[in-house]
Image (cartoon, helix red, strand yellow):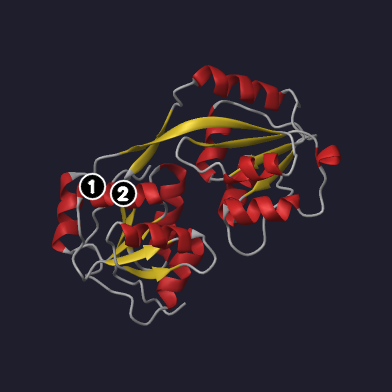
Amino acid sequence: MTGALRGARVLIPRDGSWGARVAAEVDRRGGVPVVAPLIASAPPRDEASRDRAFAALAAGEYSWLFVTSAASVEQLTARGVRIPATTRIAAVGPATARAVAASGAEVSFVPLGESSAAAMAAQWCAGRTPDTAGRSLVVRSDLATAVISDELALRGFAVDVCIAYRTVGVDLPREVASSLARGTIDVVLLTSLSVARELRRQVGPLPAQVRVASIGPGTTRDAERLGFAVAHTARTQSVDALLAELDDAGDAPTGPTGSSEQQGTP
């Protein structure tokens, strides 16, 4: 660790346990975490359908559970869903797998390489047949794509979809929005298209000195379409990798240590 993040003010766009964990890692690397959520999870429009799917899952009606984000895991935990041992869990990437493990469940499948729905579906389907795989449940947000469920259905696998939550925008505190507009935030972590959209809506174009760091190629492409200049893209699509790569980069920005403007950390 070279300490290139030392003194840098880093915007963390989600709060809760995820935000607290990322803030702790930024702090460990000598940066100044600015926890200011741009998105949050809200109940789905059809809560009855969600509850039916969760009840079927808890009753052991599914052989496989697919989770595509830590937020999906949080929804299951918040509703008190206990995943039976007979249901195997597929996680889209290491970060989601860690969330599953933290909930007390065990992950059976994580795709190699890129953490994406396409990679997950392709690798999971390889070597499996519809008559032996059983029925699967995909738990996701309203904004997530249907790549996994569509691919499984196309290949003849039995699959249901549960929209467990909606992703909604959260207004930044005025002082944080002002800091971004003035360029006194050094690094912004872009973790999804939803975060990028809210950042664009609330702040607009960022000053050149604000370093935009993306969690993966897909998010980078989305952010660039919105007009952001992405300075760094994580190679393995996890926030831990993103922070490590930024910290190792010789050109990472640094700001005055101790100018904390932390929002929303539990």
Question: Which residue reaches farthest right?
Answer: 132
Residue at image location 60% in from the left, 32% down from the top = 161
Q: Nearer the viewer, residue 248 or 146?
A: 146
Question: Which residue reaches farthest bottom?
Answer: 250
Left or right: residue 264 versus residue 100 is left
Q: How many numbered markers are drawn?
A: 2
Kind of residue sitting beneath label 2: Arg
What secondary structure is marked by label 1?
A: helix
Quadrant including the C terminus: top left
**Disc 1 vs disc 2: Cβ atoms closer than 8 Å?**
yes
What residue did someone put label 2 on? 197
Kind of residue sitting beneath label 1: Arg
Left or right: residue 53 versus residue 157 is left
Q: Position of residue 3 (x, y in %)?
A: 39, 76
Q: Position of residue 86 (x, y in %)?
A: 80, 34
What residue did someone put label 1 on? 201
Q: Is residue 250 above or below residue 198?
A: below
Left or right: residue 266 versus residue 262 is right
Residue 41 visible in the current orientation:
yes
Q: Position of residue 233 (x, y in %)?
A: 43, 68
Q: Position of residue 35 (x, y in %)?
A: 32, 50
Instruction: Tell me the distance, in whole angstroms, between the alpha carbons under discs 1 and 2.
Output: 6 Å
Q: Is residue 234 above or below residue 249?
A: above
Residue at image location 42% in from the left, 58% down from the top = 219
Q: Nearer the viewer, residue 31 or 125?
A: 125
